[in-house]
Image: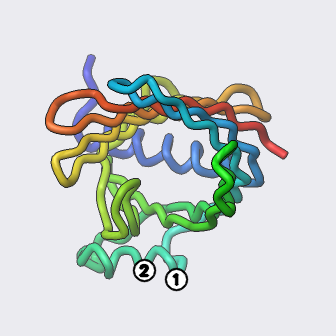
Amino acid sequence: MPFSADTALILAESLVQSFFQETVGDWRSERRYYTLKSGETQAVVSHLTIEFLAAGAPPLLQLAELHQLDAQSPLICGTTVTWESDYVGTGKKPVVGSTLFGVRGTTLYRDRGFATTKPVTAQYHFNDSRTLVLKTQYNDSCFEEELRLIGQRYRTRQTIISRAGEEIMIGQYLETRI
C-alpha cells in the first residue's frame, strides 16, 4: 500500500534529519573530477567540517529569509559545511569556503550553489535510509548528486554535472571521518 503524501513527507524529513546528524564531524574528502569531452581529470583533497542545525537555529532563520520563505513553515533542520580544498598539482593556494543547507519538505535550500553565489534549491529523496540523492538545477545546468553513508567512518559521493541536457563532468568522492 503506497504512503499518503503527508506520510511520505514526514518520512523524508525524518530521514534527512537522521542523515544530517550522522554526517556531523570532520571529514577528509578525496575526489576526482572528470571532464567528459576533453578527458581531463582534476584531483582535489579537502578537509570538511559539518555541523548540524536544529529548527530555529539563527543560520536557518537567515537562510529562510534569504529564500523568502513563510515564517509559519520553518526549515526543520540543516547543516553548515566549511571546507579547505587543495587542488592537487596546480600550484594554487588552498580554497576555503562554507555552505549553509536547510530542509523543508523534500526541498533542500542552500545559501549558494555549486557554480553560483546565489541561493539555490534542490529536490531530494532517499534510495534507502543511508543514501541521499539531490537534484539541483539553475542557469541551464543540472547537478545530480548521490551521498552514501558507509558504516560510521566513510561516505561516498558522486556528482554528475550536465549543461543543456549533455553530461559534461563527473565528480567522484571518497570521504573518511577524521
Quadrant position of residue 126: top left
Residue type at numbered disc 2: Leu
In the picture, the quarter occupied by the N terminus is top left
Q: Which residue is mark 1?
A: 58
Q: Nearer the viewer, residue 36 or 90?
A: 90
Q: Which mark is residue 145?
A: none
Q: Disc 1 on helix, strand or loop? A: helix
Q: Nearer the viewer, residue 161 or 2?
A: 161
Q: How many labels sit on residues?
A: 2
Q: Disc 2 on helix, strand or loop? A: helix
Left or right of 30? Residue 135 is left
From what the image shows, is residue 146 above or below residue 72?
above
Q: CA distance from mark 2 to mark 1?
A: 5 Å
**Looking at the image, which residue sits at the far right?**
178
Left or right of 126? Residue 7 is left
Quadrant position of residue 125: top left
Residue type at numbered disc 1: Pro
Q: Residue 60's x, y, as percent?
A: 46, 74
Work out whether residue 23 can be spotted.
yes
Q: Residue 102's x, y, as percent?
A: 44, 62
Tell me which residue sits at (36%, 61%) in the image: 109
Identify the image's colour scheme: rainbow, by chain, secondary structure or one colour.
rainbow
Determine contact: label 2, label 1, CB under 8 Å.
yes
Tell me which residue sits at (32%, 81%) in the image: 65
Q: Residue 83's x, y, as percent?
A: 65, 60
Q: Nearer the viewer, residue 171 or 136?
A: 171
Q: Nearer the viewer, residue 106 or 110?
A: 110
Q: Which residue is mark 2?
A: 61
Q: Residue 168's x, y, as percent?
A: 31, 31
